[in-house]
Image: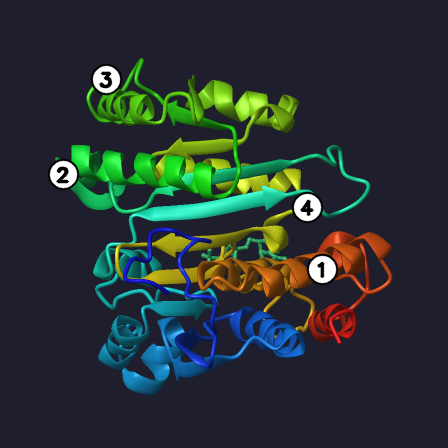
Amino acid sequence: MDGSATSLGNAGTGTLVSLPATLIRGDGIGPEVTEATLRVLDAVGASFDWDEQVGGVTALESEGNPLPDGTVESIRRTRLALKGPLTTPVGTGFRSVNVALRREFALFANVRPVKSMVPGLRYDDVDIVLVRENTEGLYVGFEITIPVGDDRKAVAQSTAIVTRLGCERAVRFAFEYAIAHGRQRVTICHKANILKAVSGLFLDVGREVAEEYKGRIDVDDVIVDACAMKLVLDPSQFDVIVTTNMFGDILSDLMAGLIGGLGMAPGANIGEDVALFEAVHGSAPDIAGQGIANPTALILAACMMLDHVDEQGKATRIRTALEETIREGAQTTRDLGGNASTFEFADAVSRRLS
Ligand code: ATP
């Protein structure tokens, strides 16, 4: 990597000699999908020098803290992390360990690509990248409840915080990403017609930033509710979407649904100094420990990590092996209509790499 972590896919020196990186296996299905991902990375010869750390419930049990100092220090040192999903234990002072990590390292852009790989779905041409502002909006958690009479929670208030800086760096990242990845258009997704202050600021700043890219990247904008409908009607009309925190959270799950579900959707959290790669899905406690989770989302997150360190060749080989395995259909997990276990699927992908 060079000094900046912000240029996903364009950041490396071309060499990858045991690059230090933090590994957090996570909670629920995290250890299973992480082990599967490591097998695939091994098969392609990606040599990260993993510093294993813990987080979430696993860390609470072993270290008494869902986000131990050692984990934070490791990420600060390596500036590169692959993370399984973390469950936030109740009563530990954390609203969300995942959000705490994004805040700690100012991971301002959350990149969530979706691309068709699963045959037989309604669409086979989905190829969209959503860039979500990752640190602001309603998710800052400024919330209060106001008691009235005997009702302790009669009124609830939540405050969204949106800053010019936050909007600007997320939108600029989306345009830079579009250029680096040969994309044509960025769509600014907002609700400025109702949320005139917070969403209006995002749209205004978005249009200002877009001016700088005139002639290189096209821009348009869409209201979030219309965006949801258009995504379902015809996802091929979108290229890169940039939006605020909560809208991005919701739309990225919708987009995962277009390509086969949460098991297929990776994400990258990008800041000035640190990049952290993960699946969009959570710890899925309902299927944890059964060996049936689909590891594709975390494997694709690892591909984004390889792109980030300028190992696009290896990332492409993995993506091709994944797609071939999924399209062939003999070794897919249950969520994709198959009967294979997490490791059988990962091993089928690995065999195509060796
Ligand atoms: P969390 O609170 O940690 O986000 P959750 O159960 O609310 O957990 P997810 O973990 O994102 O939400 O999962 C929602 C559902 O999607 C799960 O119950 C599971 O059935 C399915 N799912 C998620 N990830 C996968 C996966 N990798 N493979 C198969 N199914 C998955």
Residue 196 bears which disc, if any? 3
Dot in front, 4 or 2: 4
Dot in front, 2 or 1: 1
User: Residue shown at 14%/37% (left/top)?
Assistant: 146
Query: Residue 317, image x and y in percent?
Result: 68, 62
Query: Residue 121, image x and y in percent?
Result: 76, 38
Count numbered badges in the picture. 4
Please tell me which residue lies in front, 206 or 72.
206
Say which amino acid is labelled 4: Gly
Sequence order check: which comes first, mark 3 or mark 4? 3
Q: Which residue is mark 1?
A: 322
How crowded is the residue under tag 1: few (<14 C-alpha within 10 Å), some, or many (20+)?
many
Residue 118's place in the image compared with 307, above or below, is: above
Q: Which residue is mark 4?
A: 260
- Rounded to the nearest angstrom, the CA distance separating label 2 from label 3 is 29 Å
- Rounded to the nearest angstrom, the CA distance separating label 2 from label 1 is 53 Å
Sequence order check: which comes first, mark 1 or mark 4? 4
Q: Secondary structure at mark 2?
A: strand
Q: Give the position of the N terminus as an image quadrant.
A: bottom left
Q: Give the position of the C terminus as an image quadrant.
A: bottom right
Colour basis = rainbow
Marks 3 & 4, CB-CB < 8 Å contact: no
List the single residue furthest toward the front: 14
Q: Which residue is mark 2?
A: 147
Query: Residue 232, image x and y in percent?
Result: 62, 27
How crowded is the residue under tag 2: few (<14 C-alpha within 10 Å), some, or many (20+)?
few
Q: Secondary structure at mark 4?
A: loop
Q: Is mark 4 within 8 Å of ligand 1?
A: no
